[in-house]
Image (tube, rainbow, N blue to C red):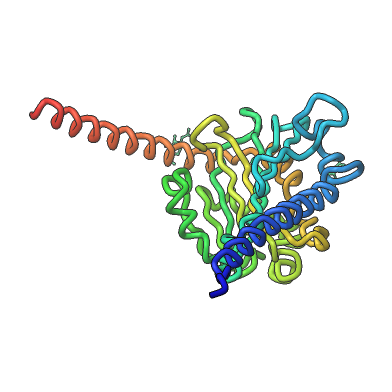
Amino acid sequence: MKPSYTVEIVCVSILIGYTLNYFIGKRENENLASAWASKFCVKDSMFEKNFSLLGVGEEEDSPLLLKEATNVFKFYASGRRYCHGLLATMELKSRHDLISRLFNSVVPCKDEISFEVYMNDEAMDHIVFAMARNKAVKTMHKKLRDLQRLGEILPLPDRRKWVSEELAVISESKEVAGDLITDVVLDQVFGDKSFEKFGKYFMSMHFSDQNLGKHKKMLSFKFALPDTKHMDDMVRLVALIPYYIDLVGRYKLSTQARNKTEGARQKAAQEAYKELHNVRQSFTKRLYGR
Ligand SMILES: *[C@@H]1O[C@H](CO)[C@@H](O)[C@H](O)[C@H]1NC(C)=O
Ligand SMILES: *[C@@H]1O[C@H](CO)[C@@H](O)[C@H](O)[C@H]1NC(C)=O
């Protein structure tokens, strides 16, 4: 009887497919990351004009993008008033992994880019504010501690021009939300008409002076990435970043608004203290059995 090599052939084909896909997928991700960088971080681009230092390296020709994983790229910029740095993180689809790729053809996911702007301590007043698509806003409200403690989802205002119906706003103060949603951003991206055209890749933004961790005062933005040929489609979104750095950097709450936020913050701090106290007490009880 002639031996049959079916199993071996199938195995070897899978292995070859997997390996080929690894190199193709890796390449695709690198191309996407560098398409973004060559739109926004090269000479005369938005970041080059708005920040004096780009990239992490000290040397002139050090690479702009830091590759952290096959599908994760980072970009750092600094040298702008009101903030001490900006970190962009691209999290791309796991194209290099055949299994993920097959899985994503059934359950689609997005290529994402997020920006964290670390604000100077004196350049950010009491601001706890977020905006996201309707579907995501409740989760955001529950998940992020500062929003959960201090923010509330704002109802639509009666008369004022406001953001597109696809978006929802969480804020500690109505006044602050009104001041941060300017006519400029409504015209550029967030208004009804412009959001349809330019908001396609917007996911969320979150500004807070109450972050946990090393960077207490921070602006975060999250966008989806277009494909390599359509980077122009996110120009208006990326332009929000320097715009908001300046707006927030200059912004001061009115006396009444600050009075309100101070009151709310004290109350939140007291509640947090009580919680901690309760936890400690029950812990002591368990420990000593009394
Ligand atoms: C910063 O970026 C914005 C948006 O692209 C641009 O309009 C502006 O001219 C830049 N700022 C400077 C100082 O070049
Ligand atoms: C804040 O407002 C309350 C009541 O409206 C007032 O009693 C208090 O003095 C104000 N506090 C400050 C710091 O202005």
Location of residue 274 with respect to 108 vertically, above or below: above
Q: In the image, ligand 1 is in what quadrant?
A: top right
Residue lying farthest front? 1
Q: Residue furthest right?
A: 44
Q: Residue at x 81, y 31 (%)?
A: 53
| Viewer-proximal residue among 101 and 195 | 101
Above or below 216: residue 1: below
Quarter-of-image position of residue 191: bottom right
> x and y percent of residue 205 in the render?
61, 51
Q: Residue at x 67, y 55 (%)?
A: 19
Residue 258 locus on image (x, y percent):
53, 39
Residue 282 percent coordinates (x, y)? 18, 34
At 51% from the left and 32% from the top, the residue drawn is 213
From what the image shows, is residue 153 above or below residue 47?
below
What's the residue at 79%, 62% (across, down)? Answer: 233
Tell me if 38 is positioned left or right of 266 in this view.
right
**Depth check: 136 or 43 in front?**
43
Quarter holding the C terminus is top left
Which one is nearer the viewer's eye here, 140 or 12?
12
Q: Residue furthest left?
A: 290
